[in-house]
Image: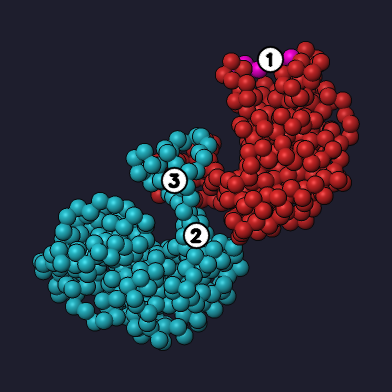
Chain colours: A cyan, B red
Amino acid sequence: MILTVTVNAALDITYYVPALKPGSVHRVRAVHVRGGGKGLNVARVLAALGEQVVATGLIGGQAGEMITDDLGGSVAQEFLPIAADSRRTVTVVAEADGDMTAFHEPGPQVGQREWARFCAAFEALARDAAVIVLAGSLPPGVPVDAYGQLISRTAAPVLLDADGDALRCGLAAGPALVKVNREEFTGLLGPGSADVTAKPGMLEVPAAVTLGSDGAVVSTAARAWRAVPPARVPGNPTGAGDAFAAALARGMARGARWPDMLADATALSAAAVAAPVAGEFDADAYKRFCRQVKVAEV
Amino acid sequence: MILTVTVNAALDITYYVPALKPGSVHRVRAVHVRGGGKGLNVARVLAALGEQVVATGLIGGQAGEMITDDLGGSVAQEFLPIAADSRRTVTVVAEADGDMTAFHEPGPQVGQREWARFCAAFEALARDAAVIVLAGSLPPGVPVDAYGQLISRTAAPVLLDADGDALRCGLAAGPALVKVNREEFTGLLGPGSADVTAKPGMLEVPAAVTLGSDGAVVSTAARAWRAVPPARVPGNPTGAGDAFAAALARGMARGARWPDMLADATALSAAAVAAPVAGEFDADAYKRFCRQVKVAEV
């Protein structure tokens, strides 16, 4: 099975309003609520692909209950309950122009003992994992090298999808593969790296960098590949990165070759953009895109 | 006791961000969560004033639990549970300029049987009430003349604090007193009424109209009074209207004279503006303002 870790799970709330007017009161036209956090989104995509997946992480309070209720039976759940409430995110979609404005709560205060208990629970779950996905932000109280600590507790290959210091500290522990987007890659290497050129050895470990509608690259110590999506896909890019990570994790579990994993992840990511609901993918578009994505070694 | 009715209770979430930038992702610096809805806010102020108060209304789901948990033991609770989730409101405070941008969810879908059960429960509770406060918006599924239906089920004097059609239909049933702000009054009588001049018979029933920093007026069939607050009070106006309503309800329960009720409500409302937290009031400022508010018959 594939084990996904969501340390900072979130109740993702989306509000649809005709237009966003700062300084005024908006009557929300429609509300969409979903259990989220990167790891959970990856788990949901893996389950939709028919993979055996277990979701673990920290969950607290009524917001935590709403997150696990929303997941329901689609994903096997092994969350550790914590005392503080899981966070919310609120995304306001202005229907006039599709503009999205988001507010992310920092997350619950996690106690040292809670973190220690989670590390032990993770170690036990990790024994049965073919691949482990560590994805998303860290809540207050969790050590900044949390991902490094988890990587050091398992022999299974780890896919790391993080940002900032959590990413930096995780990288030092040597994950099997790291997945970042353009902004995260630039944050890691500095502003000179904004123009991402595919080449071997981009990071100390194998790396996949997503570039939005420009596709994605994979770079290992010795080789590099670039994937070009078939055409500009109109739709909602929210969740496309999580679909990309899910495809990578499945490829790792199957021992796929790097260029095949890259092509598959690029196609699934584009199929997620094509789906009307964030976090889902268009199965027909996925099949079509699998034939159309072009991968070349550079 | 005073009975407050909150048909559309809300989990009021406040986010503090440095500045609001439409189209971008905001890391929320601080989160404040509170059980709300006008009726509940009035109940909380009455409890803080030492009054015996019972809060009733409709509550559903985990959001509903969070609302009642937040109230705790400060207010006696007699809510009817419903199947759908209570709504949230999200208010984003931009710390740079204090600007507030709010998003109000429409509220849970209430079933016909749930509404009928609530009406029966209300009738029983109302028998012990010296005064009843009907305050706030109506959720989907509740009849637009909900406040009228409730008023017709009780002989106790009712203070009505509502807006739009809910206000219009409630007025027709003859509450003892209606409390509106300038915008609600204008919405009722049309744009020509934007400049509120205190005079007798402003509405068919006794009416209190709050005018922000310009004070407030009370108008009965035969007489009218105007209250002028002592000086411009800096602070947070959120919840000032609910403090005003709470003072009116207490005055009604005690059989106070109209000008005394108006003065007291104007002082308490200004003391709510002076308190740093929305929905609370500054007790020292309240005492001082009680001596300083000027009420004159017009």
Furthest toward the right, the residue is B255
Circle 3: element type: strand
Give the percent coordinates (x, y) of residue B166: 64, 35
The stretch in magenta equals: B194-199
Residue A242: in magenta span:
no
Do the residues indicated by labels 1 and 2 lie within the same chain of the protein?
no
* Residue shown at the point (59%, 55%) measured from the top left: B85
Tags 1 and 3 touching, CB below 8 Å: no
| Crowd class of label 2 (few under 14; some 14 to 19; many from 20; radius 10 Å) | many
Q: For this rendering, which residue is in front, B230 or A39?
A: A39
Tag 2's secondary structure? Answer: strand
Residue A11's disc is: 2
Taking A122 as reference, is B54 above or below it?
Answer: above
Name the mark on residue A16: 3
Q: Distance from label 3 to label 2 (Cα)?
A: 16 Å
Hey, which residue is sitting farthest top in the picture?
A: B298
Q: Is residue A150 visible?
A: no
Please, which chain is the residue tagged with disc 3 on?
A: A
Percent across and percent down for residue A7 are: 47, 69
User: Residues under labels 1 and 3: Cα distance?
Assistant: 39 Å
Residue B88, relative to residue A161: is it above or below? above
Q: Are marks 1 and 2 in contact (CB under 8 Å)?
A: no
* Disc assigned to residue B197: 1
User: Could you say which is closer to the camera, residue A97 or residue B51?
Assistant: A97
Q: Residue at x 74, y 48 (%)?
A: B119
Question: Of residues A101 and B200, which is closer to you in this image?
Answer: B200
